């Protein structure tokens, strides 16, 4: 049977890179095996969940190209896919457990428990407070707020076999009677997760290893409810440079942050997949290669440190290589960044040719848009230092003369332009250095650009000559 996997984020306003990595591994497995990926929104924490934070999450997943087969926006036979709309199901599971004597109502107030905890700590500050089972045998039903607690076993062990971490065995004496339902009827994570994974037919639960401690509790619930357990695969963590879990303290950690900075989606996925998976020494993968090569056998247990520079290198490599980012796709990716610069008249063919001139140097799409700006802005924005240094009176007549000479070049392409330019330099006993910078500033407004003849070829005859002449006027004025 094809696997059913799921991605179950708690919306927090943005998609954390660590969660995106988990989504990626699930997606890869579903796409590789022809299985199904379910997206479930774990929004029982009403304070943190809002329609906006769900939208941000969904938008980030869509941008990464991690689509799902069941869930918000696409529907499916196991909905609703928002936990906040599934409360009656958790209630039913809880009632069943109570009815079968496997869970009970606990009326201990927070104050009572705090007091018991404080007393314990007074005797031994290091002691771990464990709920003493005060209400376990209670038979009355006072009209008081109550939680529901699961009757955890205190003997034996709970074992499961993890696809990444192997056999994991937890002594039951470490478990306490954990809460499954709050006084307001909202479920706790472990109950909601088990009910949903069961009802949604999930066969493999792959998630961050920060949940590995929850798994024995979930297994106890599966067994108490007499439900088939799914398989589990826990994934290593993305750590910050300091060695703790990567967090906002470490800087930008949201997928959206990197989208805004102009990282391509595949650059993000390619970097994220390294956290837990590798394929020999290969560093850069296409989406299809990831799908083809992904396997659980190659998932490892080692946490990895987030490295901003490496991330940028990987993103750059994705952009640089035409086999990974074909021209048409590059153009689509960079358009929003050009629009954001106020450029709107962007002929597609010119854009394609312009991209070829900057692809080797543009490290992000934001950087690319900056390097493409002068191709689409008339007149080009002049860097004042470049203008002051190179558009000086001595350059004026050369720019004018050059414009006249180049006007006759046919066809208007880079080799012809270069040949004519070099002839002209020789005729006037000038060297390239003396002329190249004023010409560059004339064409691009900058002192750094791709090779001049490539720039001229992309600009086209009319615009290139116009820029040389306008710059001559500026140069004369000094
Ligand atoms: N909502 C949990 C989280 O975002 C899901 C954990 C799980 O996958 O079971 O961490």
Image (tube, rainbow, N blue to C red):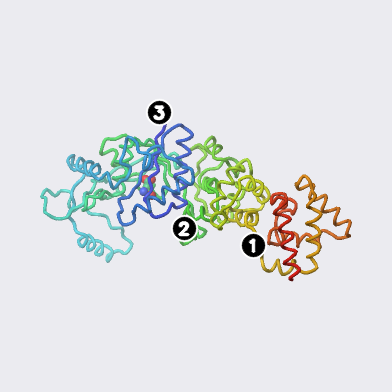
The N terminus lies in quadrant:
top left
Judge left or right: residue 400 versus residue 230: right
Q: Earlier in the sequence, mark 2 or mark 3?
A: 3
Q: Nearer the viewer, mark 2 or mark 1?
A: 1
Q: Can you identify the residue that label 3 sits on?
A: 1
Residue at the spot x=31%, y=64% of the render?
A: 125
- For the residues marked 2 and 3, what is the alpha-carbon distance in whole angstroms? 39 Å
The C terminus lies in quadrant:
bottom right
Q: Earlier in the sequence, mark 2 or mark 1?
A: 2
Q: Are marks 3 and 1 in contact (CB under 8 Å)?
A: no
- Disc 3 CB within 8 Å of nearest ligand 1 atom: no
Q: Are marks 2 and 3 in contact (CB under 8 Å)?
A: no
Q: Can you identify the residue that label 2 sits on?
A: 244
Q: Can you identify the residue that label 1 sits on?
A: 381
Residue at the spot x=74%, y=55% of the render?
A: 465
Q: Nearer the viewer, mark 2 or mark 3?
A: 3
């Amino acid at each position: 049977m094809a696997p059913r996997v799921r991605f179950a984020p708690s919306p927090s306003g943005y998609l954390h890179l660590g969660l995106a990595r988990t989504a990626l591994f699930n997606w890869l497995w579903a796409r590789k095996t022809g299985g199904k990926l379910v997206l479930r929104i774990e929004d029982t924490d009403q304070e943190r969940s809002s329609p906006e934070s769900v939208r941000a999450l969904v938008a980030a997943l869509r941008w990464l190209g991690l689509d799902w087969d069941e869930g918000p926006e696409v529907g499916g036979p196991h909905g609703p896919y928002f936990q906040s709309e599934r409360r009656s199901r958790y209630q039913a599971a809880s009632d069943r457990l109570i009815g079968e004597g496997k869970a009970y109502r606990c009326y201990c107030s927070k104050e009572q428990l705090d007091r018991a905890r404080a007393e314990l700590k007074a005797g031994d500050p290091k002691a771990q407070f464990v709920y003493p089972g005060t209400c376990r045998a209670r038979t009355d039903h006072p009209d008081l707020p109550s939680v529901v607690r699961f009757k955890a076993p205190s003997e034996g062990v709970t074992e499961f076999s993890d696809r990444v971490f192997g056999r994991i065995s937890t002594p039951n004496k470490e478990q306490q009677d954990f809460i499954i339902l709050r006084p307001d009827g909202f479920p706790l994570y472990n109950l909601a997760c088990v009910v949903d994974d069961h009802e949604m037919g999930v066969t493999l639960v792959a998630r961050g290893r920060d949940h590995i401690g929850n798994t024995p509790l979930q297994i106890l619930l599966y067994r108490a409810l007499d439900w088939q357990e799914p398989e589990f695969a826990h994934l290593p963590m993305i750590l910050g440079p300091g060695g703790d879990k990567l967090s906002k303290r470490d800087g930008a950690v949201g997928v959206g942050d990197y989208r805004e900075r102009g990282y391509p989606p595949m650059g993000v996925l390619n970097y994220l997949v390294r956290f837990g998976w590798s394929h020999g020494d290969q560093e850069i993968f296409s989406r299809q290669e990831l799908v083809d090569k992904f396997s659980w056998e190659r998932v490892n247990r080692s946490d990895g440190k987030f490295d901003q520079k490496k991330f940028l290198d990987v993103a750059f490599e994705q952009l640089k290589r035409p086999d990974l980012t074909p021209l048409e796709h590059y153009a689509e990716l960079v358009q929003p960044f050009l629009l954001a610069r106020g450029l709107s008249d962007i002929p597609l063919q010119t854009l394609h040719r312009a991209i070829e001139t900057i692809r080797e140097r543009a490290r992000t799409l934001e950087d690319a848009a900056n390097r493409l700006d002068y191709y689409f802005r008339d007149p080009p924005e002049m860097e004042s230092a470049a203008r002051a240094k190179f558009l000086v009176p001595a350059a004026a007549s050369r720019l004018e003369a050059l414009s006249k000479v180049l006007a006759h070049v046919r066809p208007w392409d880079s080799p012809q332009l270069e040949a004519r330019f070099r002839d002209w330099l020789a005729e006037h006993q000038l060297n390239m250095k003396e002329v190249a910078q004023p010409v560059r500033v004339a064409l691009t407004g900058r002192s750094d650009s791709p090779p001049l003849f490539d720039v001229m070829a992309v600009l086209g005859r009319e615009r290139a000559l116009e820029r040389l002449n306008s710059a001559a006027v500026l140069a004369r004025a000094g």
